[in-house]
Amino acid sequence: MDTELARLAAAHGVATWYENDQRQRVTVDPDVVVAVLERLGVDAATPAAVRRELDAVAATREPTTLPPTLVVRQGSHRHLPAAAELRCEDGTERRLTDGLPPDLPLGYHHLTLGHRLATVIVTPPCLTPPARSWGWALQLYALRSAGSWGMGDLGDLRDFARWAARGLGAGLVLCNPLHAITPLHPVPASPYSPSSRRCTNPLYLRVTDTAAYHRADPETRHRIDEMRPSSIEVIDYDAVWAAKRSALELLWQRDQRRSDQHGNTADTDAPVDAVADFATFCALAERHGPDWRGWPAPLRHPASSQVAAARVELAPRVAFHAWLQRQCDSQLAAAQHAARNAGMPLGIVHDLAVGVDPGGADAWALQDVIGTGVTIGAPPDAFSQRGQDWQLAPWRPDRLAVEGYRPLRDMVRAVLRHAGGIRVDHVMGLWRMWWIPPGEPPVRGTYVHYDAEAMLAVLTLEARRAGAVVIGEDLGTVEPAVRTRLRRQEVLGTAVLWFQRDDDAPGRSLLPPEQWPSLAAASISTHDLPTAHGFLRGEHVRVRADLGLLDDPAREARQAASERTELLALLRDQGLLGDAPTDGTIPVDGTTTGDMVTEDDIVVAMHRFLTRTPCRLLLASPYDVLGETRQPNLPGTVDEYPNWRLPLPVTLEKFREDPRVRRIAGELAAWERGTRPRDEVAHAP
């Protein structure tokens, strides 16, 4: 690669090479580097353009130049090139003659040095790790009850959390992302492809928990009750939203008439900030379609005069969507309040998706700080030989820095508003993202680097202010420096039974429990991996083979059998199983095999294995406990598999009564109390 192009790419954080999952060096094609630089507003199309851009970079690297954002840990000192004025977040002002002093308060402050301005982020040195606790990893949409409409909702979340705390002693509920989708048909199913990470998905509203429903007359309530979708085997988001939208619009209209009659404008106050953006986007999307990139040109930027005029013209629809967000906020608050009041130390922990739909609300409203015309994913690896394109838009690192990371902090603050914690999906994205230029396959991408210190500073500062725990999803290929930095900041990692292996041992054998990390949330599986019973039955191989996703199904089946045998041996060596078969075959539950263990016994042993690790948090999945073999999401598929549409095999009411739930919850609760049961085989009564 041309030396000057490589220098320019490095100056803007664009990788010209990287190490793959086999630790082999891979050189990025020069035209890919040029295309990614273009998406950062850098012209590298010709040698002359590269030299001009390098001159511009040199001008910003003068010794007296002030970067747009500075990060300092509380208690440490940072040098400045000259005396400066600091206006603190609380409005107080300080004259700085010897750099940034160690006694600065936590927060976002404004620095003036000569004619230059910068944001100073003062972050806590580290977070306070949580006391050991256990909880449920919940796919909320899958949790149906007698009160929900075709999918789990915020009322179910409230009731589940209250019961899990009082009845089982759980300390948290980790929930799938509840970010807002664009509420139009067809309704997107994936919670990890949101329209907005700053707002909440209205499909999760419980209609009958709204104040408007309780204020309605009996006839209206009966009419709304009749709209409830019938029970279904696979979640139909379009049917759910059609029913809820009709009911909520009816309640909204009746509330508006009541407000007009009594002069009460409480529900019609103009929305602000993120809610205003989202509500305006939804109103425009109803008229022009769900992807803003196909709207009339004057409407494609939120600051245009035509958008301002549209807000006035579409005021009733803007107000309706803002009203929906207020209902979501109220029900989210109720869920967290119920969890904490029931004794949960953390309560609800919310999941943060790694990016947003390029055609959605945040990509429209925040397009000045979000990369347009580019998507993110992953390079080729053993899991996906062609790489992955997640069809999500990323932050622009340069624009975030200029904005003092305000868009990032606003988003994190919104997620933590009613939460005891946050799980950051693909936490490695705080360091770098795999950008894929328009029209290119995933293999034709490259990494774009971010200021991880600033990204972490925002995350930890907002978490400290919210009193929240932070969990980073650090599965897969992760640079050692990433995990080291996360641990130093007391951010928990993610430890999954299938992946905890000794990389230095022959065959990368499974780690014994005492060698697991302490600063981690431990679980058997995740939503993208086989369930416990699915793993034991080889369901993850069978379904992929049936869909034609495997090049060599027989080899994959042999590998799965070997991994199953290895796991059973580890559980047996730990004294957690009785007569587990040594060849990896497992009797189906309900068969008679003398004293031999069954699948349910082995799943209990897996959970007991987790209690022997030093991990701070343990997470159980209802899918694992209830014997479900189908995993919530099958990566590499869209419509071939019912991703994100599989309900739990029983309702919430039946779940509460299931003896398997009590059995496993008892093991985890005893671990939390520090009074683990005596070491008895998992199949004992």
Image: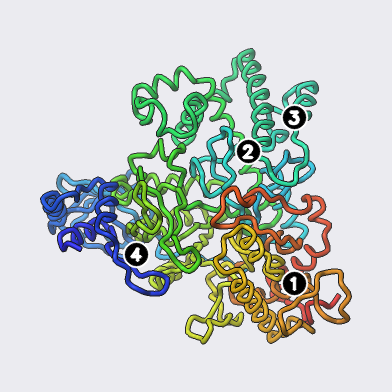
Q: Residue at x 86, y 75 (%)?
A: 685
Question: Which of the two discs, 3 and 4, labels the residue nearer the N terminus?
Answer: 4
Relative to residue 145, is residue 106 drawn left or right? left
Q: CA gap, disc 3 to disc 1?
A: 41 Å
Relative to residue 130, is residue 302 drawn left or right? left
Task: Determine which residue is flagged by label 3.
Answer: 227
Q: CA gap, disc 4 to disc 2?
A: 45 Å
Q: Which of the 4 image quadrants contains residue 496?
A: bottom right
Tag 2 near tag 3, CB within 8 Å: no
The label number, if any, that marks residue 75 in the structure image: 4
Q: Residues within 10 Å of mark 4 (few under 14, many from 20)?
A: some
**Could you tell me the amino acid type at mark 3?**
Met
**Could you tell me the amino acid type at mark 4?**
Gly
Which percent across, then down, holds residue 156?
Answer: 71, 46
Question: Which of the two discs, 2 and 3, labels the residue nearer the N terminus?
Answer: 2
Pick the residue in front: 528 or 332.
Answer: 528
Q: CA gap, disc 3 to disc 4?
A: 58 Å
Task: Determine which residue is flagged by label 2.
Answer: 203
Q: Residue at x 55, y 29 (%)?
A: 321
Q: Residue at x 58, y 80 (%)?
A: 510
Tag 3 near tag 1, CB within 8 Å: no
The label number, if any, that marks residue 604 in the structure image: 1
